[in-house]
Image: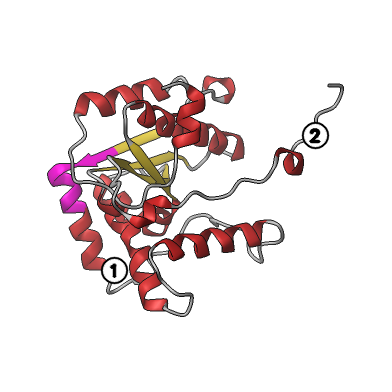
Amino acid sequence: MNVSEALATRMSCRAFLPTPVPEATLRAILEGAKQAPSGGNLQPWRVYALTGAPLQEFLALIRSRIPMHPRGEGSEYEIYPTALWEPYRTRRFKCGEDMYATIGVARDDKLARLLQFARNYEFFGAPVGLFFCLDRRMGPPQWSDLGMYMQSVMLLAREHGLHTCAQEAWSVWYRTVGEFLKLPSELMLFSGMALGYRDESAPINTLRTERAPLEEFAELRGF
């Protein structure tokens, strides 16, 4: 699989098979992704991977705390700007509508929507859960470096026949995640990521979000 194919087939997978991912495969992905660029070669990313018994122990902990904190514990950063403006507001709205349409959930069925959203906190059934952190003293440039590392993980996963779903939704459980992983105080949780083999029979995995045409976001000068 070349890079173009990996980009074209990468998607946010929201239903996984329980098939285990070999340790050697995960190591190859995380090792290969370290070639991602970072300003000054800081390499500010930190990654924690859970599978098997540790993953099940963690998910049980989350399940026990959701009734007490149905909206999580709050996030250390804003996932989206407040009062999102156009065209971003419409893009986000359409993404949600298209996703729920794949599983036949109506807009006014708030319970079904909440139950689907709660699947985030099961890693959508993926056999591997990843957490990505960086030193909280770092700034926006290093956040972008971490994003490039995560993108590299997602593309290399495709090379190995795997799928992923990046999950900033985990940021609202930063206290519990930090407690379970025993994160050093200077590390900040940015995002989780589900990784595994896609359930090809799941309707929700038919979603392919739209992309704006090149002319909408790029200017080519002197060509």
Q: What colouring does the structure picture have?
A: secondary structure
Asked if residue 70 shows in the view, the reply is yes
At mark 2, the secondary structure is loop
Image location of residue 34, percent across then percent down: 42, 22
Main SS of the magenta part reads helix
Q: Confirm whether the magenta stretch covers residue 55.
A: yes
> Disc 2 marks which residue?
219
> Disc 1 marks which residue?
66
Residue at figure coordinates x 64%, y 61% from the top left: 89
- Choose between 153 and 207: the one closer to the eye: 207
Image location of residue 32, percent across then percent down: 38, 20
Magenta-colored span:
49-58
Asked if residue 44 shows in the view, the reply is no
**What amino acid is found at the position of numbered circle 2 in the picture?**
Glu
Q: Which quadrant is the N terminus positioned in?
A: top left
- Choose between 137 and 58: the one closer to the eye: 58
Q: Quadrant of residue 47?
A: top left
Above or below, 216 relative to 79? above
- Choose between 156 and 149: the one closer to the eye: 156
- The residues bearing labels 1 and 2 have C-alpha atoms spaced at a distance of 46 Å
